[in-house]
Image: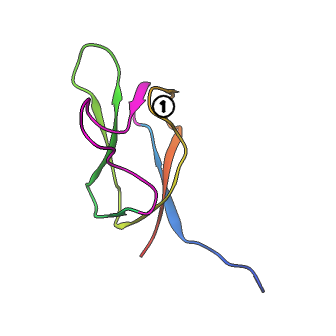
Amino acid sequence: VLTGTNVTLGSAVCAQAIGLFRPSPPGSPNIGEEGLTVKTGDILGLIESGPTQPHMVKAPCPGRVARVFIASGQPVQYGQPLFFLEHE
């Protein structure tokens, strides 16, 4: 039983590949910023992993981007949390 505690329901959005995180394609504004409301499938960023197409990081559910855990250009590992979405 929780009393006097605020509980936020949400989902972590984790990396599905290893590589370098980019919040947007070069020359474009950042996509997944804190406070942004998203729908299922919206692109939050991308992971560059070699000469192939980048892996798109997509919202698994509708919600609000409550937290961004990674900065542009940082290396990411498979399964690493990148975002936290608050459920609406």
Q: On the image, which quarter does residue 40 sit in?
A: bottom left
The picture places residue 31, in percent across and down from the top left corner, at: 32, 48
The picture places residue 2, in percent across and down from the top left corner, at: 75, 82
Q: Can residue 74 be found in the magenta stretch?
A: no
Asked if residue 1 shows in the view, the reply is: no
The picture places residue 62, in percent across and down from the top left corner, at: 34, 67
Quadrant holding the N terminus:
bottom right
In the image, taking residue 43 as reference, residue 66 lies left or right, namely: right
Identify which amino acid the numbered label 1 is placed on. Tyr
In the image, taking residue 53 as reference, residue 65 lies left or right, namely: right
How many C-alpha atoms fall within 10 Å of the one at disc 1: few (<14), some, or many (≥20)? few
Seen as rendered, the residue at the extreme top is 51
Residue appearing at x 24%, y 38% in the figure: 28
Quadrant holding the C terminus:
bottom left
Residue appearing at x 33%, y 44% in the figure: 30
- Count of all numbered marks drawn on residues in the image: 1
Is residue 47 shown above or below 85? above
Residue appearing at x 50%, y 27% in the figure: 74
The magenta segment is 16-35
Is residue 2 shown above or below 65? below
Magenta portion: prevailing SS class: loop
Element assignment for label 1: loop
Residue, disc 1: 78
Residue closest to the eye, 48 or 34: 34
Q: Can residue 18 be found in the magenta stretch?
A: yes
In the image, taking residue 44 as reference, residue 66 lies left or right, namely: right
Is residue 66 shown above or below 31? below
Residue appearing at x 42%, y 31% in the figure: 21
The picture places residue 3, in percent across and down from the top left corner, at: 78, 86
Asked if residue 27 shows in the view, the reply is: yes
